[in-house]
Amino acid sequence: MSSQQGFVTSLPVASRSTSAQEIVSLSDQAGAVIIRNFMTAEQVVRINDELEAPLAALDAGSKHEHELIAEFHGQQTKRLTNLITYSKTFREEILDDDLFHEMGRVLFEQECGDWWLTTAQLIEIGPGNKAQMLHRDMAQYYPFVAMNKNAPRAITNLMLALTDFTEENGATRVIPGSQNWDNFEDVGSPEMTIPVELKAGDAVLFGGKVVHGGGANLTTDQYRRGLTIPLQASILTPEEAYPLIVPLEVVRTLSPRVQKIIGFRSQYPNGSPGLWQHNYTDLAEYLKL
Ligand SMILES: O=C(O)CCC(=O)C(=O)O
Ligand SMILES: [Fe+2]
């Protein structure tokens, strides 16, 4: 990491051979950590192929009735959800990745004790899209905002690059250090941000307390495509209601740990005898998984 006039100007870089413990601690210290080659080139090709048709069928821009939320989603941006149903590589390889699960364990074991997925979304920022408003992802769980940096860990985002992310084409921008500010109503300003430049296949892990936003796409012909896979404490409600969305016959083909993080098995946060159950037994029994 280097710093100029008090601002951090680069992020720490890890690889798949860095331990999950080290990756999480770098992310906590700096606000974000880049993980080079999280996916293989071949996985990137397969995921892009599997998502091509549903992405083509989707219009850019948001249909949300609330203006601010529509702006947050981006006028020239496509956001494709339900990736678990659409992409076999995503559900069988990315969601079942050992490093991913190890990071989840390290992130959540001390406080909440258990975790699941918030959403899995492809975000493609098209030419001319302006910068997304700066925000902290934990603001989704609003009471935590008042607790500022002392809030428990609610959410941490793993963003995977499916194309190169450059400053020009809308790389995610972060304010390193903002995870430690005293007042979380303050989301800083664009000059304080740095772009997270990634090669296709790389990932960035950033906590829900760090200020960030999608960058402006200043190109005329490049589509910045990323997968956002936030992990969250399973005492909190996710964005995507997978058990109502993903077909059970697809779920039966998945490993138990993937079934669990998409809500088809019960959750066991610290201090709880179990949540998200049926008749006080694990959902897996009821569903005959
Ligand atoms: O697309 C990006 O780079 C960031 C998106 C984001 O932060 C969000 O939607 O919460
Ligand atoms: Fe975000």
Image (spheres, helix red, strand yellow):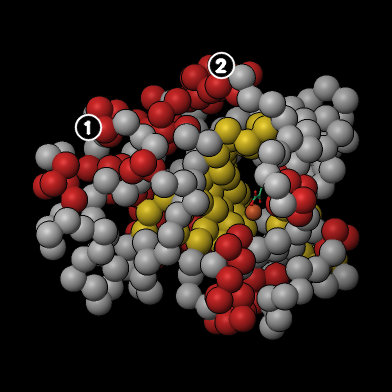
Query: Which residue is label 2 attached to?
Result: 53
| Whether label 1 touches label 2, CB < 8 Å | no
Horizontal side of residue 107 vs 250, given as left or right: right
Task: Using the rendered view, name the quadrant where residue 168 is placed.
Answer: top right
Whether residue 202 is visible, yes or no, is: yes
Task: Using the rendered view, name the quadrant where residue 103 is placed.
Answer: bottom left
Which quadrant of the figure contains the N terminus? bottom right
Instruction: Using the image as rendered, state which of residue 241 and residue 258 is in the foreground.
Output: 241
Residue in the picture at 41% in, 29% down: 85
Q: Is mark 1 within 8 Å of ligand 1?
A: no
Query: Which residue is label 1 attached to?
Result: 252
Horizontal side of residue 180 vs 106, given as left or right: right
Residue in the picture at 78% in, 33% down: 76
Residue in the picture at 84% in, 43% down: 130
Whether residue 27 is visible, yes or no, is: no
Horizontal side of residue 17 vs 267, given as left or right: right
Mark 1, Cα crowd under 10 Å, few <14 / some 14-19 / many 20+, is some
Q: Secondary structure at mark 2?
A: helix
**1 or 2: tag closer to the N-terminus:** 2
Q: Position of residue 218 (x, y in %)?
A: 88, 35
Q: Which quarter holds ligand 2?
A: bottom right
Q: Position of residue 18 (x, y in %)?
A: 46, 51
Horizontal side of residue 99 vs 53, given as left or right: left
Q: Amino acid at mark 1?
A: Arg
Q: Position of residue 195 (x, y in %)?
A: 76, 49
Picture disc at residue 187: none
Q: Is mark 2 within 8 Å of ligand 1?
A: no
Mark 2, Cα crowd under 10 Å, few <14 / some 14-19 / many 20+, is few
